[in-house]
Amino acid sequence: MNKKQIRILIIVSIIIILLIFFVVLFRDKLNKKLINLNTRNIDNSVPINTNVQKTEEKNENLEMISAKDENLNLNVVSVARNFLERFGSWSTDNKENNFVTAYVYATNDMKNSIKDFSINTEQLKDGYNGYYGVTTKVMNTKLISSDNSSAKVLINFQKIDNSGSVSYGDAELELLKEEDKWLVDSFILK
């Protein structure tokens, strides 16, 4: 082998070694992030039943109740999250349709509140000249309380407007169950 081939072989070997090093180095960090994503909506304040049941029938009943509660919690949090991102993201270019996607997640009272917001927001009035847009992203959610007909969710969010200004806030959403669907009934900024 000549010197040029040896140099290429050394460079390729170094690149392969570096790739292996970075994969090993960042694998743990990636796994931790994936675990955090999978568990971030679980409410750790709910007590876990640690009593061991002796009969299979009792275990099956507990598993069904636990799965039902977890499904309820995930559904409530998902509705709250989707509503906030849709209600909190709007622009002057889409005045009539800004909040249509949020209506899917809203009770009639909340729909009226959204309409009032749209009418009373300076940038959404007909005489407003220029462009203004805002995007809202949910950062974290916490189920505060829930039962079969109502729930409260606390949401931390990030808001970015078209100028690049970034702000953070908290909102408490109250949800009601209407015809087997969870809907946002109120929205309170904290």
Image (tube, rainbow, N blue to C red):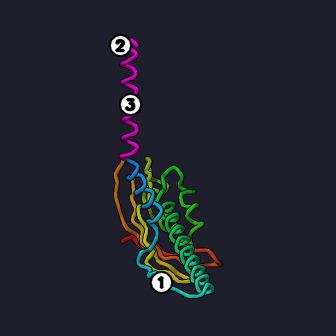
Label 2 CA crowd tier, 10 Å (few <14, some 14–19, many 20+): few
Q: Residues within 10 Å of mark 3 (few under 14, many from 20)?
A: few
Circle 1 residue: 49
Mark closer to the chain start, 3 or 1: 3
Dot 3 lies on which element? helix
Q: Secondary structure at mark 2?
A: helix
9 or 61: nearer the viewer: 9
Which residue appears at 45% of the width and 74% of the height? 143
Image coords of residue 146 (percent x, y): 50, 81
Magenta span: 1-25
* Whole-percent x, y for residue 100 in the image: 58, 61
Give the left or right position of residue 83, taking residue 47 as reference: right
Q: Amino acid at mark 2?
A: Lys
| Dot placed on the residue nearer the N-terminal end, 2 or 1 | 2
Q: Residues within 10 Å of mark 1 (few under 14, many from 20)?
A: few
How far apart marks 3 and 1 lie (CA) works out to: 52 Å
Q: Is residue 105 above or below residue 123?
A: below
Percent of width and height locating residue 95: 53, 55
Q: Is residue 14 magenta?
A: yes
Q: Disc 2 designates what residue?
A: 3
Res. 112 visible in picture: no
Residue 15's disc number: 3
* C-alpha distance separating marks 2 and 1: 70 Å
**Residue type marked 3:** Ile
Dot 1 amino acid type: Asn
